[in-house]
C-alpha cells in the first residue's frame, strides 16, 4: 500500500520551498513588528498606571522661611483632603540629586534657592481640579503639575508606534493573502492537467481546493515557524540590550507573558489566513471552468 | 432499449471559430456498444467531449441519464461525471502516482474508504494483466501498459457509460484486440460503450456494435444503425 503522501493527486514536491521561504520572511517581519507594537502598548499601559492620579505641587518662593511655612500648611491641608491618598514633601537632598547632572557639586549648596515640591497621589475618586483649587486657596503662587500632562507627548509617541505596528501587521496579513492568491493561481496553472483529470473523474471544486489548502497551510506553518523563531530570538536579544540601557522610560517597553503567547500564535493565525485565501482563490478560479 | 444519451441538433464551436460539430442528432441505447468513426479532424474528440461533459454545446439539446445536460448546474456535473468512464486518447495518467493509485483515483474521488479500495483495485489490475506493475509509475510503463491503466481507471467506478477516444491508437494489434475484449466484457455487464476509432479492422471484431460516422463535423448516419459489412446490420 502506498503512503498518504504518495497517493496525493497533486505532486507536493513540485515547487516546494519557495512558498515556505516567503512565509518565513513574512512571519519574521510580522512577529518583529508585532513585538514592537505589543511592547509599546505595554509601555503605554505601564506609563498610564504610573502617572495616573499623580501630581506635583511646586512652591516657588524666594524667602526660605515663607516657602517652608507654605509647604507645611499645604502638606497638612492635602493630607486632610478626601481627594488625596498620599502627600509627601520631596526632601532637599533628593532635589539636589536630581539637579546634580546640570549643576554639579553646586546643587548641594545650602544657599541655592530651590522650590519646595510635594508629591501627591490622588485618591481613587480624587479630582485633580479640586486639589488644585485647594492648593491655590492656601498658596496662590503654587503650581500644580499633573504627571500625565508632561508625559503626554511620550505617551502619544508610544501610542503612535503601537498603532503603526498594528497597521503594519495588518498590511503583512494582506500581503500574505495576496501571496497565497498568486501561489494558488500559479499552482492551478502548474497542475492544470491533473486538475482536469480530477474534474473528469468527478472531483468537486471543494475536493480540488482542499489539495491546495493543505499544501499552502503546511508551507505557511513550516515557513512561518522558522520566521517566528528567528523573530523571537531577535526580540530576546533586543530586549536584553534594552534592559542593559537602564533607562527609566524604555524599561517599561517590555513584553508580558500574554504578549509572547500572541506572538507564538501569529504563524497559526497566518496559516489559517492562508488556508482560507487558498480556498477562495482556487474555488473562484475553478468556478470559471466547466 | 431505453436511451441513455440523446443529442438533438447539437452544434459546437470553440470561441468565435466555425462550428466543429453541426446539427448532430442521435440516441445511444442503454447497454449498447457504439463505434464512432471518421477521419482525423472529423470531430470525434469534440463529440466525445460533449458526451463526457468536458464541453457544453453552442446550441442544441443533450439529454444524459434522462436529464438536460446543457443547462445542468455546474455543481451537479461531478455527480454526472462519476457515472461516465473516460479513456483519453493521451491516457492522462497522473505521472507521480503509481498504477495502483491512478486506478484508485475515481474511488478516492467518490469518497470510498481507504480500507475498501485495495481489493477492487487489485482485481482491476489483474483484469488488465498488470498485477506485476502495481507500484510502477506511468513514465516507466509502456504505451500499452499505460493504456490498460487508463482503461482500468475508467471502469473501476462501474460507470454507466464508457467513452474511449482512440484507445488502440498507441498499441500493437494484439494489444488492441485484448483491449477491445476488455471493453466488450464490460459492455456485457451492462455498460454503454462508445469507442472512437478509425480502425475498421477493430470495428469488424464486434459485429453487434452500432457505428456512427462523422465527416467534417456532421453525423452521416444519425440513427447509429450502420454496421460493418461483416456484421448483421447490413
Image (cartoon, grey):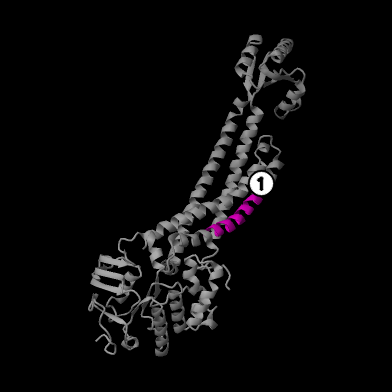
Q: Nearer the viewer, residue A2 or B179?
A: B179
Give the chain letter at badge 1. Answer: A
Instruction: Decide if residue A50 is on the left or right side of residue B149.
Output: right
**For residue A229: magenta?**
yes
Query: Is residue B57 visible in this depiction of the protein?
Result: no
Label the magenta part by its dominant secondary structure: helix
Q: Residue A15 at what x, y percent from top left?
A: 51, 66
Pick the front one: A194 or A115: A194
In the rendered image, residue A191 lying in the magenta stretch gets the answer: no
The residue positioned 52% from the left and 67% from the top of the image is A8
Q: Residue furthest front?
A: B1
Examine the rendered structure and indicate whether residue A231 appears above or below residue A246: below
Can you say which quadrant of the picture contains the C terminus of chain B?
bottom left
Q: Is residue A139 visible?
A: yes
| Of the pair B97 and B103, the residue shown nearer to us | B103
Residue B219, percent across and down? 24, 76
Question: What range of the chain is rendered magenta?
Answer: A216-233
Which residue is pictured at 51% across the width and 68% down the height? A11
Amino acid at each position: 500500500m502506498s503512503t498518504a503522501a504518495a497517493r496525493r493527486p497533486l505532486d507536493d514536491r513540485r515547487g516546494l520551498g519557495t512558498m515556505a521561504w516567503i512565509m518565513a520572511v513574512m512571519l519574521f517581519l510580522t512577529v518583529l513588528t508585532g513585538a514592537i507594537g505589543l511592547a509599546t502598548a505595554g509601555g503605554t499601559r505601564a506609563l498610564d498606571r504610573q502617572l495616573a492620579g499623580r501630581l506635583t505641587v511646586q512652591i516657588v518662593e524666594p524667602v526660605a522661611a515663607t516657602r517652608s511655612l507654605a509647604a507645611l500648611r499645604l502638606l497638612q491641608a492635602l493630607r486632610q483632603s478626601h481627594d488625596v491618598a498620599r502627600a509627601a514633601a520631596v526632601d532637599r537632598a533628593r532635589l539636589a540629586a536630581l539637579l546634580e547632572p546640570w549643576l554639579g557639586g553646586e546643587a548641594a549648596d545650602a544657599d541655592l534657592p530651590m522650590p519646595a515640591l510635594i508629591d501627591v497621589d490622588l485618591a481613587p475618586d480624587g479630582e485633580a481640579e479640586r486639589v488644585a483649587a485647594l492648593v491655590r486657596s492656601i498658596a496662590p503662587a503654587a503650581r500644580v503639575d499633573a504627571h500625565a500632562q508632561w508625559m503626554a507627548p511620550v505617551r502619544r509617541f508610544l501610542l503612535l508606534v503601537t498603532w503603526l505596528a498594528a497597521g503594519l501587521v495588518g498590511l503583512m496579513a494582506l500581503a500574505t493573502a495576496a501571496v497565497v492568491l498568486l501561489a494558488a493561481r500559479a499552482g492551478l496553472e502548474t497542475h492544470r492537467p491533473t486538475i482536469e483529470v480530477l474534474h473528469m473523474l468527478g472531483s468537486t471544486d471543494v475536493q480540488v481546493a482542499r489539495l491546495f489548502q493543505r499544501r499552502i497551510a503546511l508551507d505557511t506553518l513550516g515557513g512561518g515557524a522558522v520566521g517566528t523563531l528567528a523573530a523571537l530570538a531577535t526580540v530576546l536579544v533586543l530586549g536584553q540590550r534594552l534592559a542593559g540601557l537602564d533607562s527609566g522610560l524604555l524599561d517599561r517597553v517590555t513584553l508580558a507573558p500574554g504578549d509572547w503567547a500572541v506572538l507564538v500564535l501569529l504563524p497559526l493565525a497566518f496559516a489559517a489566513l492562508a488556508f482560507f485565501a487558498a480556498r477562495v482563490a482556487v474555488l473562484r478560479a475553478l468556478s470559471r471552468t466547466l | 432499449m431505453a436511451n441513455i444519451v440523446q443529442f438533438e441538433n447539437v452544434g459546437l464551436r470553440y470561441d468565435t471559430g466555425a462550428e466543429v460539430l453541426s446539427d448532430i442528432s442521435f440516441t445511444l441505447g442503454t447497454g449498447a456498444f457504439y463505434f464512432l468513426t471518421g477521419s482525423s479532424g472529423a470531430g470525434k474528440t469534440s463529440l466525445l467531449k460533449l458526451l463526457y461533459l468536458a464541453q457544453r454545446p453552442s446550441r442544441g439539446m443533450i439529454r444524459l441519464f434522462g436529464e438536460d445536460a446543457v443547462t445542468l448546474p455546474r455543481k451537479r456535473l461531478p455527480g454526472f461525471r462519476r457515472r461516465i468512464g473516460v479513456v483519453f486518447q493521451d491516457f492522462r495518467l497522473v505521472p507521480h502516482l503509481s498504477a495502483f493509485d491512478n486506478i484508485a483515483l475515481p474511488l478516492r474521488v467518490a469518497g470510498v474508504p481507504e480500507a475498501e479500495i485495495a481489493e477492487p483495485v487489485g482485481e482491476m489490475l489483474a483484469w488488465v494483466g498488470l498485477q506485476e506493475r502495481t507500484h510502477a509509475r506511468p513514465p516507466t510503463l509502456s504505451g500499452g501498459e499505460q493504456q490498460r491503466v487508463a482503461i482500468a481507471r475508467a471502469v473501476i467506478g462501474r460507470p454507466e457509460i464508457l467513452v474511449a477516444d482512440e484507445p488502440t491508437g498507441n498499441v500493437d494489434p494484439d494489444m488492441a484486440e485484448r483491449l477491445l475484449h476488455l471493453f466488450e466484457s464490460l459492455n456485457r455487464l451492462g455498460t454503454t460503450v462508445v469507442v472512437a476509432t478509425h480502425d475498421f479492422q477493430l470495428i469488424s471484431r464486434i459485429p453487434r456494435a452500432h457505428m456512427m460516422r462523422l465527416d467534417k463535423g456532421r453525423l452521416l448516419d444519425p440513427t447509429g444503425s450502420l454496421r460493418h459489412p461483416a456484421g448483421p446490420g447490413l
